[in-house]
Image (spheres, rainbow, N blue to C red):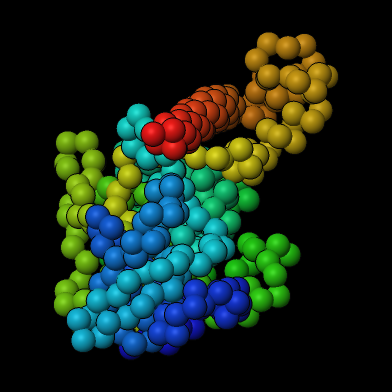
Amino acid sequence: MYALQELGWCEFFAQQDTQQNDGKCNVVPARVAEENRELFRLFSEHGEFFAEVSGKFRHATTSRADYPAVGDWVLAQLRPRENRATIHRVLRRKGKFSRKIAGRKTEEQIVAANVDVVFLVSSLNREFNPRRIERYLTLAWDSGARPVVVLNKADLCENAEAFRTEAESAAMGARVVLASATRGDGLAELRTLLRCSAEGTKGRETPALQKQSGLTAALLGSSGVGKSSLINALIGEQSVALRWGAPLATQAVREGDDRGRHTTTTRQLLLLPGGGVLIDTPGMRELQLWDAADGIGRTFGDIQELAARCKFRDCKHVNEPGCAVRAAVASEALDAERVESFHKLEREEQFLEAKQDAAVRSQRTKELRKMMKSVNRFYRERGR
């Protein structure tokens, strides 16, 4: 049994529930705790249930992104005797962390929904890469959550402060925390961030959102950075074992190249004993952008500020005269690699937007052809 507030329920979702109950008297709110091949595990006031979407929901849904994701609040019809449920509707999201699905398809994949804080975890070894941090930040700012960069395995690094300085130069406006799951560094700071109010969203949230107690945090990062170890440390291995049977599995990185091994295979929602919700995610080796124009602007705010001083409004910051960005690079006030990263992400976003437009046109053409076939069939059958 769970209290809804313990799971992150607030007035934002309660208003949707009372305004639209889908005409079903035994539909209750529940939060998606795990997803595995369209089979979902739900947490609710009545306990845990395994669920599938209803046939009506499946028929009406046209996009994979409209299906429930970990962190979503849904309205579900419970069957307690079977320990099963049927999901009828996904409540409107406060935000979502999305990326382009791996492969050639131009489709959105929601990694986590309704997240207040995103912990972007990187380890202090050869995996550390400021350019990767910038990519994660770009998507994190667009998610509506407050990003926090967590530099894990500080106990294995002799110059952790130098890494922090480098990360802070890439993470403009985001907090950077040095942590060690084994030694305990930074854990108190992370727990405080989970319990405190969402400072990063103040001024943008509605009064209803301000009533939320406890935060939802998602841990994102490559394989081997120590996300599961951090969760075991934050929750306490004993508490994890009591609730889920055993602490989350962990593995050592490969000695040859510090590459991680996949231990977390599905996204799952976990509860902190002192309040707050954590979403653990599998390591992501591929992180392509999705609708990230605003996130690029937030991540590279220093470059945007310099761009306002350029001689030409449409300056591309390549070789145009009077370019303030290139001038800052020449004077070493701005890192050239950071500018190149900015250009790379902008090109990727523009390319993706073009592919999205082409995919929309193709889908509309298919729908039009299908409709015309139905119309032609109707007139042929009527003339018989």
Instruction: Name the residue at the front extreme.
Output: 384
Q: x and y percent of residue 106 in the render?
A: 42, 34
Q: Is residue 342 left or right of residue 362?
A: right
- Camera-nearest residue between 169 and 203: 203
- Camera-nearest residue between 58 and 284: 58
- Camera-nearest residue between 161 and 230: 230
Q: x and y percent of residue 71 in the render?
A: 42, 65
Eyeballing the image, is 271 above or below 169?
A: below
Residue at the location (18% across, 52% down)?
A: 252
Q: Quick check: can you spot residue 52?
A: yes
Q: In which quarter of the image is the N terminus?
A: bottom left
Q: Quick check: can you spot residue 168?
A: no
Eyeballing the image, is 105 above or below 144?
A: above
Q: x and y percent of residue 222 in the render?
A: 33, 46
When asked about the image quadrant of residue 228, the answer is: bottom left
When asked about the image quadrant of residue 72, the answer is: bottom left
Q: In which quarter of the image is the C terminus?
A: top left
Q: Is residue 2 left or right of residue 251?
A: right
Residue at the location (30% across, 75% down)?
A: 85
Q: x and y percent of residue 212 in the render?
A: 58, 78
- Looking at the rendered structure, the number of numbered marks drawn on it comes to 0
Residue at the location (54% across, 58% down)?
A: 95
Eyeballing the image, is 66 above or below 324?
A: below
Residue at the location (45% across, 80% down)?
A: 24
